[in-house]
Image (cartoon, rainbow, N blue to C red):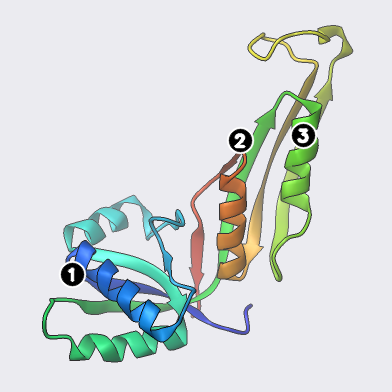
């Protein structure tokens, strides 16, 4: 799906040491595209998988595959701290579900702008559904009343290269009425 491949990298060791090692290596290499699965809200193998990773001292990242190879070589040379590459899985693409609900026409226009326009390269919107209701009998009703003059409800899924999906996750996180789910990684076979 993407010309450049990314991998889901699982590192074993103290979380602080792993993060410091990755950050130092990233800065030394000049690579800017290192994504923490925690910071970017990327789902790791379900609830139990996340618990097992924490129990085993694993920290997860999404990185370019060439960076992963260089990092693996550097980890082999480490003697001062106990870190190792636990696994490296190639990513085919990412998926991000979202939903929204708002009670203002101007907010509805803004939501549609964020969701429907200027998508990152390769990212597509699938299963997009909206339900817009305008009830002129409810005109003047306040935000917390049981009826509203305007209601926009919607949901959908973004599908595409992992970098584009991460960018969409960040964009949706910045919006008040849009609720993104966790990013789901789909691995290459």
Q: Which residue is mark 3?
A: 108
Quickly name the residue at label 1: 13
Crowd tier of the residue under label 3, counting other residues whose Cα lies within 10 Å: few below 14, some 14–19, many 20 or above: many
Front residue of 129/30: it is: 30
Among numbered discs 2 and 3, the one appearing first in the sequence = 3
* Nearer-N-terminus badge (1/2): 1
Q: Identify residue for label 2.
A: 176
Please name whichever residue, 144 or 96, is drawn nearer the observer in this view of the structure: 144
**Which quadrant would residue 174 be assigned to in this image?**
top right
Secondary-structure class at tag 2: loop
Mark 1 surroundings within 10 Å by alpha-carbon count, few (fewer than 14), some (14 through 19), many (20 or more)? some
Residue positioned 73% across, 40% down in the render: 111
Q: Position of residue 59 (x, y in %)?
A: 28, 65
Instruction: Give me the residue at 45% from left, 84% from top.
Output: 65
Q: Secondary structure at mark 3?
A: helix
**Are the residues flagged by discs 3 and 1 in contact, CB closer than 8 Å?**
no
Q: CA distance from mark 3 to mark 1?
A: 46 Å
At a point 70% along the width and 38% down the height, the residue shown is: 154
| Up/down of 47 relative to 73, above or below | above
Local crowd size for mark 2, using a 10 Å CA cut-off: few (<14), some (14–19), many (≥20): few
Residue 175 location, x and y as percent?
Answer: 62, 41
Q: What element does badge 1 sit on?
A: loop
Are dots 2 and 3 in contact, CB under 8 Å?
Answer: no
**Of the residues under marks 3 and 1, which one precedes in the sequence?**
1
Residues at marks 1 and 2 touching, judged by CB atoms closer than 8 Å: no
Residue 155 lies left or right of residue 49; in this view the side is right
Q: Is residue 110 above or below residue 160?
A: above
Measured from the top left, where is residue 57 in percent x and y? 19, 63
In this rendering, would 43 be left or right of 148? Answer: left
* Quarter of the figure with residue 143: top right
Q: In which image quadrant can residue 100 be found?
A: top right
Q: CA distance from mark 2 to mark 3?
A: 11 Å
């Amino acid at each position: 799906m993407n010309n450049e491949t990314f991998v889901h990298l699982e590192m074993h060791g103290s979380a602080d040491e792993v993060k410091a090692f990755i950050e130092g290596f990233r800065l030394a290499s000049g690579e800017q595209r290192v994504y923490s699965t925690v910071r970017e809200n990327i789902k790791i193998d379900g609830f139990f998988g996340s618990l097992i990773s924490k129990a085993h001292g694993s920290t997860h990242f999404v990185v370019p595959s060439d960076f992963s190879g260089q990092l693996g070589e550097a980890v082999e040379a480490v003697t001062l701290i106990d870190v190792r590459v636990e696994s490296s899985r190639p990513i085919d693409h990412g998926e991000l579900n979202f939903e929204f609900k708002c009670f203002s026409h101007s907010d509805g226009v803004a939501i549609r702008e964020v969701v429907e326009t200027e998508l990152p390269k390769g990212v597509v919107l699938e299963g997009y559904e909206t339900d817009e209701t305008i009830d002129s009998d409810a005109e003047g009703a306040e935000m917390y009343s049981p009826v509203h003059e305007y209601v926009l409800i919607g949901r959908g899924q973004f599908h595409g290269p992992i970098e584009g999906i991460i960018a969409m996750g960040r964009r949706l996180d910045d919006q008040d009425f849009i609720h993104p789910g966790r990013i789901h990684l789909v691995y290459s076979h």
